[in-house]
Amino acid sequence: TAKRSRSGTAIYDAETDSHRSEQLGVIGELNRAIAEDELVLHYQPKVATGTGELVGVEALVRWQHPDRGLLPPSEFIPQAEDDEIIVALTDAVLEMALVQHRSWREAGAELPVAVNIAAGGLYDNAFPDRVAAALARHAVPGAMLTLEITETSIISDPAEVQAILDRLRDLGVKLSIDDFGTGYSSMAYLQTMPLTELKIDRRFIRSVHESASDEAIVRAILQLAAALNLKVVAEGVESAAALAVLETMGCSYAQGYHMSRPMPADEVLPWAAGRIRV
Ligand code: C2E
Ligand code: CA
Ligand code: CA
Ligand code: CA
């Protein structure tokens, strides 16, 4: 017998069945969502801590579901990551982000965009070729695209990932480690992978202005990044106090609700008026 969960998903009394059928349901529906253009991207500004100017945006996917409304990624990305559909989803997101980049460029703003790549999207030998084709299709220079990947996706097969990341770097694409500090304990990959950026996970950032231990971790990451010539972005900056401390500590870039929540594409340029770097 089906009943409704708080989020409105159909769930079933038999617990083992429920996971499986919900999973199949989401994947089947995601196929339709991609075909019918139900996925939309919101964009969150990445700013320079000192001046507040906009230096880029991160694309964050949402699902405009016909019955359930606008769904956050937590409602479907984890399921998609366990399925080959993550490949089609990643391609769709990349395509939308590049189309949007071109449209901003036509409006006079050369705005670098970052796209999140799940582990399953990375372990795919054809991925760099599809990225190259997408960049060419939209005449976007590789340097305008950052791919955000997690430590855990690098660690599961470093040799294979290295080859794929090297090919992406050859396109000029920038590579960023997302949620830095929460993944694997070995940092050997930092020396070998062709990375450009670390994003410090928001758990260390939210209270950085009032927690000595958070501050110590952030300082250590900043030092490490400087020595390795990596840019650092602090994620999850929720207050002016946190932003001020980060600037004082020498963290150059920040993202978070204090500056802006992720927003629909058409709100980005109005938000950015006066902040765009020229
Ligand atoms: P993420 O890549 O770490 O993205 C940052 C998440 O933190 C976003 O949630 C963003 O809205 C939220 N956030 C930003 N600033 C703040 C803040 O100041 N405080 C707090 N508490 N949260 C903040 P969102 O959009 O719900 O995305 C969640 C996760 O879903 C992302 O985490 C990413 O792992 C995944 N995701 C989103 N879009 C995609 C996509 O296109 N492809 C893949 N594979 N994963 C995606
Ligand atoms: Ca991210
Ligand atoms: Ca993150
Ligand atoms: Ca994440």
Image (cartoon, rainbow, N blue to C red):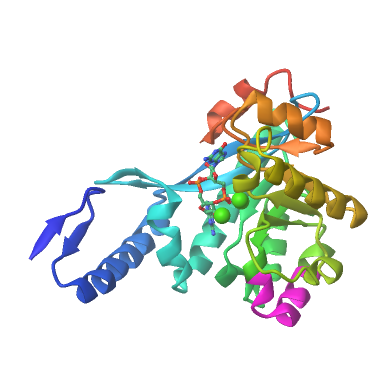
Res 54 seen here: no
Instruction: Pick the quarter of the image with the N terminus.
Output: bottom left
Figure quadrant of residue 167? bottom right
Image position of 13 (left or right of 111): left
Task: Tell me where residue 246 sits by quadrant.
Answer: top right
Q: Where is residue 215 in the image (x, y as percent from the top left)?
A: 73, 42
> In the rendering, at what x and y percent does residue 7 appear?
26, 48
Residue 138 image point, x, y percent: 68, 50
Q: Which of 224 and 111 is in front in this view?
A: 224
80 drawn magenta:
no
Near-viewer residue (2 or 237)? 237
Q: Is residue 162 part of the magenta span, yes or no?
A: yes
Against 251, is 115 above or below?
Answer: below
Looking at the picture, does residue 18 appear above or below residue 37? below
Q: Can residue 132 be seen in this view?
A: yes
Identify the magenta region: 153-166
Instruction: Name the residue at 20% across, 71% down.
Output: 15
Q: Dominant secondary structure of the magenta stretch? A: helix
Quadrant of the snapshot with the C terminus: top right
Which residue is most to the left?
Answer: 1
